[in-house]
Image (spheres, helix red, strand yellow):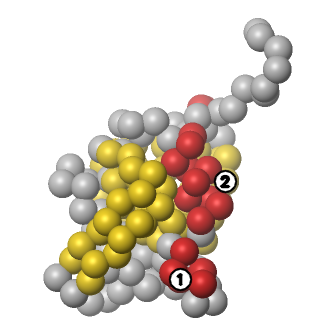
Amino acid sequence: VGRGRPMVELIAAIVVDLSDQKLYAYGAADTLLRTVPVSTGLASSPTPTGEGKVYGKHRSVTMRGSSFVAPNVPWALCVTPDQVICLHGAPWQEAAGQRFGVPRSHGCVRVPSPHARWLFEHTPLGTPVTIRP
């Protein structure tokens, strides 16, 4: 084992629980690494449930929907094959003083920025993601 920086454990699985508006990041052997409050889709634009994986990673991306354009969305981990549904930072929500833990999005999973960056830095492409009701 080398010296210097400590070994950082990679995320082996992510679970988003829509009922409690939390994200759970797991390491090897199902070790819970972090629990994070999130904001998922509103009733009018729900976050889809099911099994997926991290298909794409973007430090900054412009997201578009039928009623919005969001430039410079940070730390995006896209979890559907079309990369439409992503876990990402939401600096506009933080700037507005809106807390996490309640549905607010158009279907994505909004994550507080420091946690979104940590997820981005520690989650490899292909990591399994489960979104449960």
Residue type, mark 1 in image: Gln
Question: In the rendering, at what x and y percent does residue 111 appear?
Answer: 53, 67
Quarter-of-image position of residue 5: top right
The quarter of the image holding the N terminus is top right
Residue neighbourhood size for the residue with mark 1, other residues' Cα within 10 Å, grouped as few (<14), some (14–19), many (≥20): some
Q: Nearer the viewer, residue 1 or 72?
A: 72
What secondary structure is found at the residue carrying circle 2? Answer: strand
Residue picked out by circle 1: 93
> Residue 51, which numbered label?
none
Q: Nearer the viewer, mark 1 or mark 2?
A: 1
Name the residue rendered at 51%, 81% in the picture.
92
Residue type, mark 2 in image: Arg
Q: Say whether residue 2 is left or right of residue 93.
A: right
Q: Nearer the viewer, residue 27 or 75?
A: 75
Question: Can residue 21 be seen from the camera position used here?
Answer: no
Could you tell me if the residues under marks 1 and 2 are in contact, i.e. CB atoms within 8 Å?
A: no
Question: Which sits earlier in the primary sequence, circle 1 or circle 2?
Answer: 2
Q: Residue furthest right?
A: 3
Residue picked out by circle 2: 34
Quarter-of-image position of residue 35: bottom right
Name the residue rendered at 58%, 54% in the picture.
117
65 to 85, vertically: above or below: below
